[in-house]
Amino acid sequence: MIRDSHELLAYVNGELVPASQPAISALDSGFNFGDGVFEGLRVYEGRVFRLDDHIARLYASARAVDIDVGMTPMRFRDEILAWLRANQIIDQFHFRPIVTRGERWPPRVDPRFASGSPNIVFVGASIEPVAGDLRLVVSRVRRTPAESLDPNVKSLNYLNNIQARREAIFAGADDCLMLDDGGFVSEASASNVFLVRDRELLTPFTRSCLAGITRDTVMQLARGIGLRVTETDLTVADAKRADEIFLTGTAAEISPIAELDGLSVGNGDRPITDQLHSLYSALVRRQDHAIGLNAQPTN
Ligand SMILES: Cc1ncc(COP(=O)(O)O)c(C=O)c1O
């Protein structure tokens, strides 16, 4: 269990360094401008869930903003697995591989000032399942429009989401529903959202939210048990009259929502959320959907 930052060795450009010690240049593009991309992954019982899919998404994010990761995805995977082994990570661990545009001199906006070699960092911490039902509010902070920052580029620009989460916390809630620029439900501050209505799952299109890997897993699981799953525009009123609401994400897993803007969700029963939650918990521990920490390096 890594509970304290002093217990973790971070990966910084191939070196293992105590996570709380300075190891990245003050000129780093991610630190100065949020100019970088990242992923969030989770280890269950000695295995990393959907590791290759997360790496593919990281490389797609990097490509979309013209950051060269500087190594093959296979090598990146081996670096992650070696780092997890070095930290003796086995279970209940959430981690973030981060790739920035590297050092920038002078430290100004023009990306041509970046050195061209990325800074690559892996950090993480122990994580427990989300405890209990969550209360949401509808945030006044809108999701950055896709034309300004595509939600499918998992960039280091999370100020939008953090402002929304702060607003929710000040309102006494746990998290929020963010709306897109058209006023439709987009996602929560760091997870996707699903409504259940008459045994059908409804979720926003990925033009306004991240195509979450948990979202995709849940859609597959739901279809596997014969539920209809529809991507559609959803209003706040749709959410308020849903039978069940849940969030999905690598950290959130499947988190049931008890309240939205002070209103109880449905009649309080949540058979579909519970069923999907148990299917998900079993799946993340299954060998065939995960990469073992004892996997051999590929090159
Ligand atoms: C804004 C946002 N939406 C959705 C998600 C869920 O994505 P995933 O299921 O791939 O973890 C995340 C996860 O970090 C997120 O930051």
Image (spheres, grey):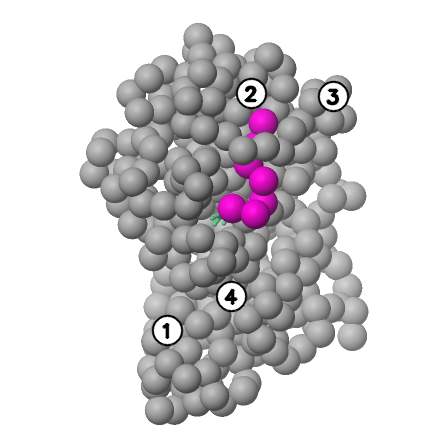
Q: CA distance from mark 3 to mark 4?
A: 35 Å
13 vs 275, left or right, is left
In the rendered structure, are the residues bearing label 3 and label 4 in contact, judged by CB atoms less than 8 Å apart? Answer: no
Label 2 sits on a secondary structure element that is strand
Image: 253 above or below 121: above
Which residue type carries mark 2?
A: Val
Residue underneath mark 3: 225
- The mark found on residue 37 in the picture is 4
Which residue lies under the disc numbered 2?
196
Nearer the N terminus, badge 3 or badge 4?
A: 4
Q: What is the quadrant of residue 205 in the picture?
A: top right
Amino acid carrying mark 3 in the image? Ile
Q: How many labels, in total? A: 4
The answer to whether the residue labelled 4 contacts the one labelled 2, judged by CB atoms less than 8 Å apart, is: no
**Nearer the observer, 231 or 127:** 231
Q: Alpha-carbon neighbours of circle 1 within 10 Å: few (<14), some, or many (≥20)?
A: some
Question: Relative to the observer, which residue lies in front, 142 or 15?
Answer: 142
Image: 58 above or below 30: above
Q: CA distance from mark 3 to mark 1?
A: 45 Å
Residue pictured at 29% horizontal, 40% vertical: 140
Q: Is residue 152 above or below residue 32?
A: above
> Measured from the top left, where is residue 50 in percent x and y?
68, 49
Amino acid type, residue under disc 1 in the picture = Phe
Q: Nearer the viewer, mark 3 or mark 1?
A: 1
CB of mark 1 near ligand 1 (< 8 Å): no
Q: Which residue lies at the image location 65% right of the left edge and 29% below the top edge?
A: 230
